[in-house]
Amino acid sequence: MRSVDFFEAHPVFRHGEYLAAHTASGRSPRTSNNLLARHLASGRLLRVRRGLYAVVPRRAEGIGFSLDPYLVASNVTDDAVIAYHAALQFFGKAYSVWKRFHYLTVKRARPFSFRDLEFVPVQVSPPIQSLPDDAKGITEVRHAGGRVRVTTLERTLVDVLDDPDKGGGWEEIWRSLEMVEFFDLDAVISYVRALDFAISAARVGFFLEQHRESLMVEDKHLEALRALAPTQPRYLDGSRKSGKLVRPWNLVVPEYVLNRRWEEQSDALA
């Protein structure tokens, strides 16, 4: 494959991808690496980090261009998946715009920054790794001339409630998820079961119960989640903030979350 054809189909790519495609036509790895270095020196390519490159559009050469963070996050490793707040932001459902992008991977990876963007890996837990592909809550879509892998909104709902720090805290999570008009609730419950974490089941159940009418939540959905909830009271998060015990979820929920009085929380922190 010619370099120009490869660049057309891969606006962000890893070194190994380029080498595999270029040597498939009979070129040596040395020749391929020399060509890559030549394109990099000419300004046709931008090195994002070691082994990761972005193609500079012809119209942007010499004047800089805006790097697409979702293409980067989805290509840092060969299994990278955009997740948490970054997934909400990708789908246009984030209340606030972040410059931090979490991605899932089974590989060992370190966070890195490029310009004003931050890319943070999250190790996939063994129970989720063992799921069949069609149950992992991952979709692949065309984006900005390439393709990205991103968690579905159903999985993202569970993930941000399971790890609220990566969702931006309760206000950001609530306001973001309230922008989503529809969830496949059977898929949500299936993923909660796979996660097998009682407090996460309770958080999801509590959120869905609060939005029962708008999200068309049925008794069967709540009953399935109640069966997975903790048997003893648990705090909504690790801060152990006082609040009201909400049964049957066995969650001690701060008043500002229970009543969605975000302004009161902001005043308290000021």
Image (cartoon, rainbow, N blue to C red):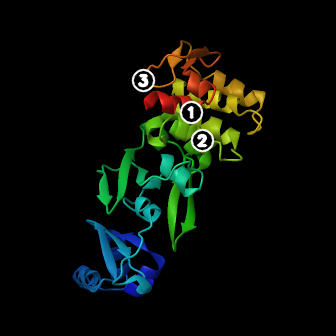
Query: Which badge, 2 or 3, comes first in the chain's sequence?
Result: 2
Closest to the observer, 31 or 186: 186
Q: Which residue is mark 2?
A: 175
Q: Is residue 270 visible?
A: yes
Query: Which badge, 2 or 1, comes first in the chain's sequence?
Result: 2
Q: Position of residue 148 (x, y in %)?
A: 50, 63
**Which mark is drawn over residue 239?**
3
Q: Nearer the viewer, mark 2 or mark 1?
A: 1
Alpha carbon of mark 2 to alpha carbon of mark 1: how far? 10 Å
**Which mark is drawn over residue 206?**
none
Alpha carbon of mark 2 to alpha carbon of mark 3: how far? 20 Å
Few, some or many residues within 10 Å of mark 3 (<14, 14–19, 20+): few
For the residues bearing labels 2 and 1, Cβ distance under 8 angstroms: yes
Q: Within the image, what quadrant is residue 206 found in? A: top right
Q: Position of residue 195 (x, y in %)?
A: 52, 34
Element under label 2? helix
Q: Residue at x 65, y 16 (%)?
A: 248
Closest to the observer, 224 or 256: 256
Q: Which residue is mark 1?
A: 262
Q: Residue at x 64, y 35 (%)?
A: 189
Looking at the rendered structure, the kind of residue marked 3 is Ser
